[in-house]
Amino acid sequence: MRAWRAYIIGTELMRQQLHRELQEAHDLTIADYEVLVQLSEREGRRMRMSELAGRIASSKSRLSHQISRLEKAGLVRRTTCPDDARGVVAELTDAGLRSLATAAPTHVAGVRRHLIDLLTPAEQDTLTTIFERVLAHLPHPATLTP
């Protein structure tokens, strides 16, 4: 129980801290940052909304609202899927890519400060092993398989 509670509270507090740092420095939420990262890593900086929702562990409805906010900010645009007229694609704009490039150093520094630098290399390896095992165990989109 001690490990479980430390995990739950620790990850939530770390996520809130990373969120605050991105919000204060770049006016981005941690959820926005995760969307921008996922899109930036794709060919053409585009991804079907349904796949994107799975990759960030979000509901389609919640992602749709988030994409609407990112569209208003000019960071993302929605287009129809070229392969399926019923599908919707989210696409990272040039402004979104610039925003991500500006925010990334803040995020990376926060992750290092609040997690990575607190662990020894052996602990980092153990953490990786643990969460790769958890990911392999839990149902998730095939695109997340380690």
Image (cartoon, rainbow, N blue to C red):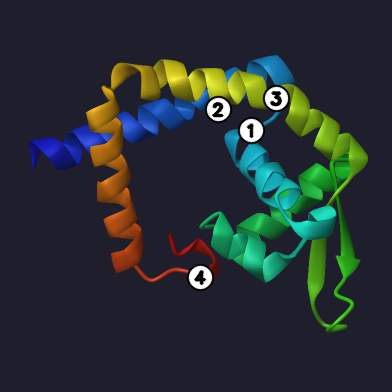
Establish if 135 lies above or below 98: below
Q: Whole-Å distance between the Cαs marked 2 and 1?
A: 5 Å
Element under disc 3? helix
Q: Nearer the viewer, mark 3 or mark 2?
A: 3
> Image point 45% across, 20% down: which residue?
112
User: What residue did someone put label 3 on?
Assistant: 103
Q: Which amino acid does label 1 sit on?
A: Thr
Q: Is mark 2 on a helix, strand or loop?
A: helix
**How far, Cα to Cα, is label 3 from label 2?**
11 Å
As rendered, which of 13 and 125 lies closer to the eye?
125
Q: Hey, what amino acid is under mark 3? A: Ala
Tell me if residue 102 can be seen: yes
Q: Name the residue under label 1.
A: 29
> Mark 2 or mark 1, which has the lower sequence index?
2
The numbered disc on residue 65 is none
The residues tagged by marks 1 and 4 sit, at their Cα atoms, a distance apart of: 24 Å
